[in-house]
Image (cartoon, helix red, strand yellow):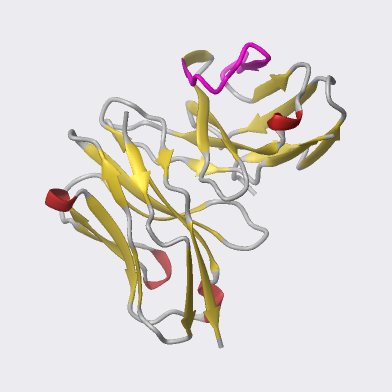
Amino acid sequence: DTGVSQDPRHKITKRGQNVTFRCDPISEHNRLYWYRQTLGQGPEFLTYFQNEAQLEKSRLLSDRFSAERPKGSFSTLEIQRTEQGDSAMYLCASSFRDRGVETQYFGPGTRLLVL
Amino acid sequence: AQSVSQHNHHVILSEAASLELGCNYSYGGTVNLFWYVQYPGQHLQLLLKYFSGDPLVKGIKGFEAEFIKSKFSFNLRKPSVQWSDTAEYFCAVNTGTASKLTFGTGTRLQVTL
């Protein structure tokens, strides 16, 4: 399967612990996005990369959140000192921008539950 | 900042009924418009997209959507739904300069036999 993959698919943690999620984009896609989705809502943008450069971060991305894409391939999203409000589905998407247009393809997501 | 409204939160239809899901966005400039679908237990999948040109776009599985610029709308339609269309449908928009997608809250479609 050559789609976007995410690991783990599910994560249960205790409040205050750190968690890290990984996203592997579609090969040759130069853009990678992170979104968060809570129950009854659509996905909300967190941040995105073009190659290894982080080009935009949402106000939703507090100081406890950090994302990296060190070699322009896979990306990690780390949440430090998790809070119950961080419980959500974390979605990754990748795309290739060509002549000003792009389509984002989503992975299966990582569902985080903070107890 | 742009925003997206999906007025129907939960729609229940019988098989073979026609479907129209509303989507309105707020942004005065050039937009790209998308409909994504999430089937139970699966990830978000692209149904169709509009970048430019013919405002009536056709997607997979018999879905189509019409971009009406004057109404800031991009409604999704299907003439005859199937039980397998049961899913959650999300409208999304980005602009010519901002790549991030802004999503609506989604519409849950339930198709009964």
Disc tally is 0
Residue B103 placed where, x, y %? 43, 43
User: Which portion, as a residue range, is magenta?
Assistant: A56-72
Which quadrant of the rendered structure holds the N terminus of chain B?
A: top left
Name of the residue lying farthest toward the left: B70
| Residue sitting at x 81%, y 37% | A11
Q: Nearer the viewer, residue A90 or A102?
A: A90
B110 shown above or below A82: below
Residue B42 placed where, x, y %? 64, 57
| Residue sitting at x 72%, y 20% | A79
* Residue B100 occupies quadrant: top left
Residue B14 placed where, x, y %? 48, 85
B106 shown above or below A107: below
Which quadrant of the rendered structure holds the C terminus of chain B?
A: bottom right
| Residue sitting at x 41%, y 36% | B101
Residue A49 visible (yes or no): no
Q: Is the magenta region chiefly helix, strand or loop?
A: loop
A109 shown above or below A80: below
Name of the residue lying farthest toward the right: A14
Residue B107 placed where, x, y %? 47, 60
A57 inside magenta stretch: yes
Residue A97 placement, left or right of B96:
right
B3 shown above or below B81: above
B73 inside magenta stretch: no
Q: Nearer the viewer, residue B47 or A85?
A: A85
Residue A109 visible (yes or no): yes
* Residue A87 occupies quadrant: top right
| Residue sitting at x 37%, y 58% | B7
Residue A110 placement, left or right of B105:
right
